Amino acid sequence: MMDHILSNIIFLPLIIAMVMGVVQAPVKVLRLGAFFSSVVTLFLVLWLAYHYDPHGGMQFVEQAPWIQSSGFTYFIGIDFLSLIMLLLITLLMPPLYLYMMHEKRKGYWYNMMLLQTGVTGAVLSLDLVLFYLFWETMLLPIFIMIGKYGNGLRQYNSMKIILMTILGSMSMLFSIMYLGYMYFETTGVWSFALQDLATLDFDAQTFIWLAAGFLLAFAIKIPLVGFHTWMAPAYGSAPTPAVVIMSSIMAKLGIYGIWRFGFGLFETTLIYYAPTIIVLALIGLLYYAIRAITEDNLRRMFAYSSGSHLSLIALGIFLTNIYAWSGSLYFIGTHALASAGIFLMIGLLYKRFKTVHISELGGIAGKAPKFAFFFAFFALSIAGLPGTGGFVAELLIIIGAFKTNIWIGVFTATTMLSAMVYIFWMLQRTLFGTANNTTEFSDLNLREVILLLPLVILLILTGIAPSLFTPMFEPQLSLFLQDALHAIGASK
Amino acid sequence: MIEQFLYASPMATVVLGALVLMLLANSTLTLSRLNLIAVSFLGLSLILQFSLYGDKSTAFLFETIFGDTFILDDFASIFDMMFTAGAMLTLLINNDYFKSHTYFSGEYFALMLFSLFGMMMLSHAHELLTAFIALEIASLSVYALVGYHKSNKVSSEAMMKYIVLGSMTGAFFMLGTALIYGSVGSTSLTEIANYVNGNSLDNIPMLIIGATFIMLTILFKIGAVPFHSWVVDVYHGAPYPITMYMASTFKIAVFAIALRLYLVDFAPINSFWTELLQAVTILTLFGGSWLAINQSLVKRMLAGSSIVHSGYLLIALSSIGLGSKVAAPAIMFYLIAYFISAAGAFGILSFIDSQSKRQMKYEDFKGFAQRRPYMALMMSIFMLSLAGFPSTIGFLGKFYIFTSAIESGQILLAGLGILTAFISVYYYFKLIAMMYFYPSEEEQKVFPVNISTILIVMMALIVVWGGIGTTLIPYIPGADGFMEIAIEAMSSLR
């Protein structure tokens, strides 16, 4: 099992789903299988994290021929970036399954397992075609989950998200094909492995076009402002587990893509795009925050809040200094945990109230203190409450921004303020204030507390003891940054 | 001499089968029995083809009598196998359809086999008049098949449209042949190739014009814009088995002759057509997308999208003209990929039609996943493959086609191809959305296990395995295996 540990982690959920599908497992068995797959992958990933060498670069590499005639390889490996993403995915799956416990619809469980395989594969792939395969296949479960199990204008919104994200993927596919062909032309062999394609050299103009293909895909996934029209409708329509995966994992995959493939393939060209993206991210910070303040639907509100924070992460990457980079990386983790928490809370709220509109809520704190505590905790950790991980991360990015330019720094700092505004105002209207039809409101039961507790503990740990986590990524991250800066410096 | 008869036996079996079926057409045998007879003749022919594959002692069939009229190469053999397999699939998958629609009679099977014989002859033809006769044998049978539902106005209208336009383009083929004969003095492809190679392009205007006329016929037969006006109506009017046969098998047959002509014999004058072909390609891509988007009937959508798929193939065809190495295998691979996916999709439509006999609009698919979860899953797989979604064989097909365009420097065409692939996501995913996103009033139905459904399941598996199958698992070819077949076929073209 440990020989091909990464393959096991990727394909275990898929295989279990397929076996369940073939034997037509009843929903109780299916649920057990899903739990089993999520717990086993969690243990495998924890084992992996324990044996992972923070100074080692790419590890646990597996390479095998896949489609030889065109040089596709099954090439996977793990480094600090993928490890963090992998930890997040596997940590979130068991609580999500616990949340879905009473779900009777089988398709729900199948889609979640397929989704786990898709996102895990995308995070671990080092071959561009393999990455593209997982990048696209993870859309299908999301498409089905929004369209079939969602609410509101679900059919329309799921078509919208799939069309917009596929537009991005298609442009990325074009760049991948061009890179692959150019590698064939220069060396005479087909290869789509990241390390091979990174050796290619073109003139500046070609690089700009190729990078545009990738950046469009990632900008839509994050989404940067201007590419965001799918976001709020999709978050608003999607069922809770899908929203959690979308905001905690898939949006971060856009960031991951910029890091892995953007800086891996075209580090110098990204400097050409840096001003544009920094401006877009700054606009995004403010625009999304304002939309979040005015939003009445909690799901859409935290969609915008998530967009605002992801813009902050994207900004951090393009500032290319160690504070901003560590901050961004740290924020990927803490924001994933916090937004998973808050979307789960909204899901629990919806189960009780059948509404997520702030104007129809109020006075929850009096009726359900435990619920109110968890709800407030996750909301505040989204806002960057000192003592939670988000605070550390945001602070690092803001310091990085001030290092670069005082005005960027000032703008960046407004995220913390604006987040405070919408979070506190929202808390005041939902938890306190006049009680609105809360008579039937039941507090959190034991299962719900258990599923939320790990997230709370991790958020507090990341907040008060960052030194527990930083050694895992710090050495490699600074090396990576040095490489990037070196390449950029050389090109100037 | 005796082994020459052996080489001719696959084609002879099909003709013999057709004649036997004609004699049996008015007997008391049921349609299922006749179908079985037709399939067993095809199976026999397929077995003969397999056993003779790669083992040819002569280059031409009956060389002492016919000269170089019929060529024997792996290229033709592989196309023969695809046609035969296509006809067999069409007959087997539609077995229920024949039983549930009263207008079918025994002659249907004879016509199918005659058209198959025409296609096989076409892939072996090494002489323009033979190619014309073969094309007309195949076409005439298909004309009759399109209008097979005699009492149905749509079907008859489709046949009229097809027969009038098709005969006119047939005349163009003859005109082209006449012009080529006028300049070369022969209609043999060997002579023509020698003549083209021996003269500079400026001295052979008549041959170029003749070859262009032939190309127009081919563009018409594959439904390229602006010769596409018949496609949607004919595909719509024809009964499902015939639509399936035309979209998957007949289209491939036209590409067989096109590849032979433009890859080998007219290769030196390909550069003359580059711009023309590129313009037609762009028109085809966008015209087809426009047609496909605007349809409310799924059958018409598939017809429109088949134009788009011709457009992708034309991209690779113009890449060949610009000297791309990967383009020819890419076309072959794409033909296999499209053949399996389209045949599967039409097969499911025909299956539904034989069960419920309704016009299949997009709306009729609402709740389909709840009524028939397995059928819906397989339909989704075929739609994903047609849309070029990764992990299906259609993705690899598109990948090779677009890479060939990049290789030949046609970045714009590759970009437009990707754009139309993106547009196609809309109309294919719309069907998936219809199937899965709406509840159904009816109960879940039992999955009927019979020959047609088993074949559909197998094709869905091939679509997925062709997309992700690896060489890691021995004895099951997967994507690499298909690519090897494609390369082998192309390398035998001389």
Image (cartoon, rainbow, N blue to C red):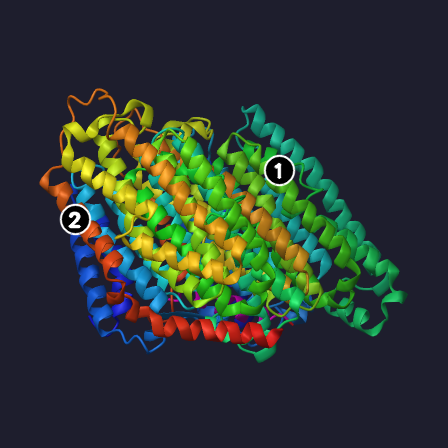
The secondary element bearing badge 1 is classed as helix
* Of residues A152 and A462, the one drawn nearer to the viewer in this rendering: A462
Vertically, is B327 above or below A63? above
**Closer to us: mark 2 or mark 1?**
2
Magenta stretch, residue numbers:
B476-493
Question: Which residue position holds label 1?
Answer: B290
Instruction: Give the residue drawn at x 71%, y 49%.
Output: B280
Residue B73 appearing in the image: no
Tell me: B72 left or right of B447.
Answer: right
Instruction: Give the residue drawn at x 23%, y 48%.
Output: A21
Q: Is residue B484 magenta?
A: yes
The secondary element bearing badge 2 is classed as helix
Q: Position of residue A50 (x, y in %)?
A: 21, 71
Q: Label 1: how many residues lie within 10 Å, few (<14), some (14-19) or many (20+)?
A: some
Instruction: Give the residue drawn at x 24%, y 21%.
Output: A434
Tell me: B311 left or right of A25.
Answer: right
Which three-letter amino acid code belongs to the residue tagged 1? Trp
Question: Which residue position holds label 2?
Answer: A453
Instruction: Give the residue drawn at x 23%, y 51%.
Output: A93
- Host chain of mark 1: B
State whether discs 2 and 1 lie on one chain.
Answer: no
Location of the C terminus of chain A (image quadrant): bottom right
- In terms of secondary structure, what is the magenta stretch mainly? helix
Location of the N terminus of chain A (image quadrant): bottom left
Q: Position of residue A317 (x, y in %)?
A: 46, 60
Identify the disc placed on residue B149: none
Residue A54 appearing in the image: yes
Vertically, is A188 above or below B317? below
- Host chain of mark 2: A
* Of residues B211 and A292, the one drawn nearer to the viewer in this rendering: A292
Tell me: A468 left or right of A321.
Answer: left
Q: Position of residue A476 (x, y in %)?
A: 37, 73
